[in-house]
Amino acid sequence: MQKITINKGATPDDYRDYSSLRILLDEFTETVAPYIERLKDCTIWMVNSTATGGGVAEMLPSQMRIARALGVRVEWLVIEANDNHFFDLTKRIHNAIHGAGDEPFTEEDLKTFEKVNAQNLKNALEYIKDGDLVVIHDPQPMPLGKLIRQERDVKLIWRCHIGLEEHTDTTRSVWKFLMQYMDYYDHFVFSLPSYVPPEIESKTTIIPPAIDPLSHKNRTLWMAKCAGILRQSGITNHQDPLLYPYYKNLVRRVMPDGSFDSVNKYSDLDIINRPVILQISRWDRLKGFKELMEAFILMKKQNESKSDKSAITYKRIKYTRLVFGGPDPKYVSDDPEGMEVLNELISQYKNVSKALQEDIAILLLPLDNPKENALIVNALQRSSSFVVQNSIQEGFGLTATEAMWKQRPVLVSGAAGLRFQVQHKVNGLINQDPSDIEQLANTMEQMLNSPKERDKWGFNARNRVIDKFTLFSQLNSWLKLLSELR
Ligand code: UDP
């Protein structure tokens, strides 16, 4: 069990300095004051399985910083696990909650699940005291919640960040497997109502995820700063002045032969001068990378059959690059399937024609330094013409929210978590079926060749995030719930 230190960051006053956030913040501080009063004698413990990568690790630090600044005692614990079977199992649980996979859960699975969690109990009990509130995030540390509950008089909450809109045999079987732990929990938090298994509906609150507008992932970057980050991280290699030193670990790119090397080694990515379609995600089959690459190739091929090669609509597609960004496998410990999915993408990429290989970049982003990683994602999102999230299933899809905050229009699949955020033709386009390659290719082309709409949708996208998906709305709901459970 590891207690995570939260680095310094924006204070409530920093948000107040931004006119569009001031009203939000003032309303928020007034509303939460009575909740905070009720929470003053206890500690809130956030427990998950990783301090880097993914949505949970993304959101916790800024939420905790604001809550602490307002007087709430909140801490973050990460469970330790050195067992491949454990991560393989928790990935299967994750996939099953998304409705994917049909391997049954065995006695052996149960033993591993409980053993790894039990190894973290002693340490957890050194921190957690009677009267505290414990929020367990996602399935990995779920049995630990039960064990803590047996030893301490705490209120126990399970925060599930994933889900499927419908209940299938696969989801029913995984909920059945997890129900033995859920019985020990006092309350549940899901991102969307349709994700909640019927058995626990009466004890569930819906809190959608949110972004921190001032985090390194989302803060404003002026053009030269953005260009500087692309250069410092090795994404561009122009000879312009470099204000700050290179990052210790640079972004790597998958080469045509499948090896990893510096981004512009084989061919210049030229991200600054070209239209760019970007998708950033973990290497997960459910993120729809494979389908996106296929659709991009189809869009390019269809474009070549056009007769008027001087038309701007032709040229726009011709010069467009597709950029995938995901964790460099060197840094990811809790995602055994990630490498497998990346390898599948690499095989797909190796079979692409030479010319098209230059138009597709699979970038591996270093995760050793969270600030640098966040700035790289920020700069890539700002450098793109639009951001895609082609997920087959998506609990929420922070990558879409992040892009929308940056006034980037988004092209998303009809997965529930994305449909909930994006309004079709208001702040982007929804391409209902992420596996319909032809439709996706056409939607991408439509997006590229609608520059005025893109500007409008991007503008609206930012307003949508301010209205619904900033950390203040989220923290408000959390503090209300926790104070009621106390
Ligand atoms: N992310 C990142 N670096 C990467 C890949 C993803 O920082 O190489 C971040 C991304 O910006 C987003 C989060 O990880 O903030 C992913 O959250 P999302 O809700 O999109 O998907 P999840 O990973 O939780 O399924």
Image (cartoon, rainbow, N blue to C red):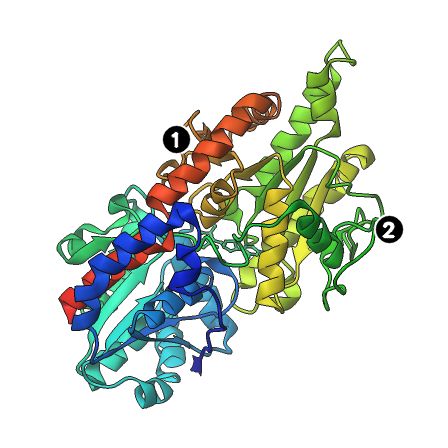
Query: Which three-letter amino acid code belongs to the residue tagged 2?
Result: Gln
The numbered dot on residue 100 is: none
Query: Where's residue 150, x and y in %?
Result: 20, 82
Q: Element at badge 1?
A: loop
Is residue 338 shown to the viewer in this render? yes
Query: In which quadrant of the rendered view does residue 464 lie?
Result: top left
Which callout, 2 or 1, points at the residue further toward the start of the chain?
Answer: 2
Q: Which residue is rendered at x = 48% and y = 29% of the image?
A: 457
Query: Where's residue 484, x and y in %?
Result: 14, 65
- Residue highlighted by disc 1: 423
Q: Nearer the viewer, residue 94 or 37?
A: 37
Query: Where's residue 59, x and y in %?
Result: 42, 60
Q: Is residue 112 left or right of residue 178?
A: right
Q: Is residue 291 left or right of residue 146?
A: right
Outermost residue toward the top?
307
- Residue highlighted by disc 2: 239
Mark 2 in CB contact with mark 1 (< 8 angstroms): no
Residue 237 versus residue 459 in the image, above or below: below
Q: Nearer the viewer, residue 209 or 404?
A: 404
Query: Which three-letter amino acid code belongs to the residue tagged 1?
Result: Gln
Is residue 442 shown to the viewer in this render? no
Image quadrant holding the N terminus, namely bottom left
Q: How many neighbours does mark 1 have within 10 angstroms: few (below 14), some (14-19), or many (20 or more)?
A: some
Q: How many neighbours does mark 2 have within 10 angstroms: few (below 14), some (14-19), or many (20 or more)?
A: few
